[in-house]
Amino acid sequence: MGESAYPLVVVVASIAALLVLILRARIPAFLALLIVSAGFGITYGMDPAAIIRSIQTGMGGTLGFVAVVVGLGAMLGALLEVSAGIGALSSGMMRLFGEKRAPMALGFVGFLVAIPVFLDVALIILAPVLHGLTRRTGRPIVAFAIPLLAGLAVSHAFIPPTPGPIAVADILGADLGLVIAFGAIAGLPAMLVAGPLFARWLERQPVFQGGIPEPQEVDGAWKGIGFLTALGIVLVPLVLIVAGTLVDSLARSGMLAMPDSLSRFVLFAGHPFIALMIACLLAWGICGHMYGMPAKALTGAMVKALEPAGVVVLITGAGGAFKQILVDSEAGAALATTLTATGMSPLLFGFVVAAIIRVAQGSATVAMLTAAGIAAPVVELAGLSAGGTALMVLAIASGATVLSHVNDSGFWLVGRYLGLSEAQTLRSWTVTSTLVGLVGLATTLVLSVFI
């Protein structure tokens, strides 16, 4: 075996070991990532003390940023959920577009609500809207569900502050403002193709005709904030983060005509920590003081939201540890050199690695984090610009979105809440997730030509 091929062999073996531990041994992804990180270091000949330091550094460096952002994002989503803000966004978009254009409206609803809320939570909350439209119009449920799911999948994978792109951006050192901007540019075409356009063809297929579902039982929501209020809360952190990125870019280029005190304030408010804190405080104040919702209910919702967020944070930290092992062992740099010699596009490499891991083990989050750790040295060696690094985040996110199937918990959630069989779910949701990933990659590659 040539020396140049050894890093590639060890990385591939590590990925295979990770999949075996998660799929066959049923070991939690957090523990599996740590085991593989330590095993990689031993196999590659690192000193045992250096392995421990790398894992500690990788965990700490990643969690220092991600834990704060994911925690704040989870609490913001909980406030919008418990205050009926998600339902208000849905109803408002439906009124704006009208019933005939309901599929298009639902695509944009999904695009908006998945920014602060996890995909599965948003689907559960909005399931009654889908069933109500199905009964009212007599059209198959996929006519409405697929556009919504496409919008949810796009924002969940492409647009911070959802955990996946936040974690990948941190591991790769990407600018969050650029990730948000490019994520929206790549995500909207993906949502339109995988959502309303695909749903229009899908609802004409005989396998989806008939079978109008019965209403699903869901927990009653407190009727609180309205459409514009909910929309404003969602947009506040995004606008602040993008504004901070723009001011920073203009200041670096010498084109900023703004007092120093004002630019420093914008940069401060535009940091993800501060932007999300402002949004959480705004939502808390509006729900509690303006709409009279009990503080106990708000606090309970926010604390409960931190439980699933904690799992995501730990898995993210373990992904950061794996990345650090690759960096400190210099195996990542050697792998990057080998891949660069083949002429393979870094963006395509990130997509393929994430897609393979996604298909094999099901979790989009694990796929994104593992692929980011492997791709980080490639990004550094390739000398990608800030824009190119942000596009790498989207390429990895696109790969981690494709081919949701029976090993993905989201696959079963979609089937359950839409009343679809396994075969129908494969023909609808699996294809939708794949279209989102492929269109996202295509748009990312087009954007790379101009970056």
Image (cartoon, helix red, strand yellow):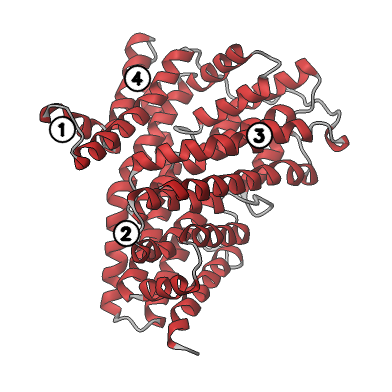
Measured Cα–Cα span from mark 2 to mark 1 = 30 Å
Measured Cα–Cα span from mark 2 to mark 4 = 34 Å
Residue at the image position 38 percent from the left and 71 percent from the top: 332
Q: Indicate which disc residue 153 carries.
A: none
Q: Is residue 397 above or below residue 39?
A: above
Crowd around label 3: few <14 · some 14–19 · many ≥20 (10 Å) = many
Residue farthest bottom in this picture: 1
**Residue 295 in the image, given as x and y percentages of width and height:** 34, 19
Residue at which label 3 appears: 195
Secondary-structure class at tag 4:
helix
Residue at the image position 54 percent from the left and 39 percent from the top: 154
Left or right of 108: which side holds 429?
right
**Residue 365 in the image, given as x and y percentages of width and height:** 49, 51
Measured Cα–Cα span from mark 2 to mark 3 = 37 Å
Q: Is residue 355 above or below residue 48?
A: above
Q: Amino acid at mark 2?
A: Met
Residue at which label 2 appears: 59
For marks 2 and 3 on the same chain, the one whose residue lies earlier in the sequence: 2
User: Does residue 361 appear anywhere in the picture?
Assistant: yes
